Image: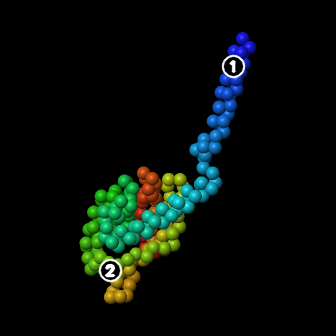
Amino acid sequence: MFQSFHDLATRSAAVVGVVVLLGTAPGLAAAAAPSPLEARIQLTEDRIAIEHLLMEYGRTLDNRDFAAYSQLFAENGEWKGALGTYKGPVAIQTAMEKIFTDAAADIPKGRNFHVMSNFDIKVQGDRATASSMFIFYKMEGSKPGAEVAGRYEDVLIREKGVWRFLQRTALPPG
């Protein structure tokens, strides 16, 4: 009987020890909440990804790559500006193709560029806001001429692990 009691006590102690170890395992604590360092790294990575998104917007537009441009927007993303409001990547792509055919027909591909600046990005988990300035230049010979200037007010969302525009509003400078 002593042997059985001893076995029971040993097994009970082992089970309690495993439960205590699992409850305080570093991996479990980290899964519950990121450390301050991990949170800072994630915030930095998010800001870099959003800055890249803002720059890709100008690059894809300047290259007239409207398919890639439209993919910068969330599934229910929206573009708003003086030329209208368009919702969803397909509608946005179609609108930009028309706008550049009509309004920018006199600007051959490679003869314009955007300059983006003054990024103010605020990240809150999987959502963010951004404000920025832009100037759209048209080349006249070898000299750039400022055609349009303004600002963007953005609402961004992390969709399927990638930052995209939920709403991009083009406004006059101000």
User: Residue 150 placed where, x, y %?
Assistant: 43, 74
Viewer-nearest residue: 115 or 52: 52
Q: What number is the disc on residue 111?
A: 2
Residue 129 seen = yes
Q: Is residue 54 above or below residue 29?
A: below
Q: At label 1, which amino acid type do we have?
A: Asp
Horizontal side of residue 107 vs 14, given as left or right: left
Q: At label 2, which amino acid type do we have?
A: Arg
Q: Is residue 171 above or below residue 87?
A: below
Q: Is residue 116 above or below residue 125?
A: below
Q: Are marks 1 and 2 in contact (CB under 8 Å)?
A: no
- Asked which secondary structure carries label 2, the reply is loop
Horizontal side of residue 37 vs 156, given as left or right: right
Residue depicted at 29% across the width and 79% down the height: 107
Instruction: Quadrant for residue 147, please give it.
Output: bottom left
Label total for image: 2
Residue depicted at 53% across the width and 53% down the height: 125
Instruction: Quadrant for residue 55, please give it.
Output: bottom left
User: Residue 47 placed where, x, y %?
Assistant: 52, 62
Most extreme residue toward the right is 2
* Circle 1 or circle 2, nearest the eye: 1
Badge 1 or badge 2: first in the primary sequence: 1
Give the labeled residue for mark 1.
7
Horizontal side of residue 91 vs 35, given as left or right: left
User: Residue 94 placed where, x, y %?
Assistant: 27, 63
Most extreme residue toward the top is 1
Viewer-nearest residue: 64 or 131: 64
Most extreme residue toward the front is 3
Quadrant of the image containing the N terminus: top right
Q: Residues within 10 Å of mark 1 (few under 14, many from 20)?
A: few
Residue depicted at 32% across the width and 88% down the height: 141
Residue depicted at 33% across the width and 58% down the height: 89
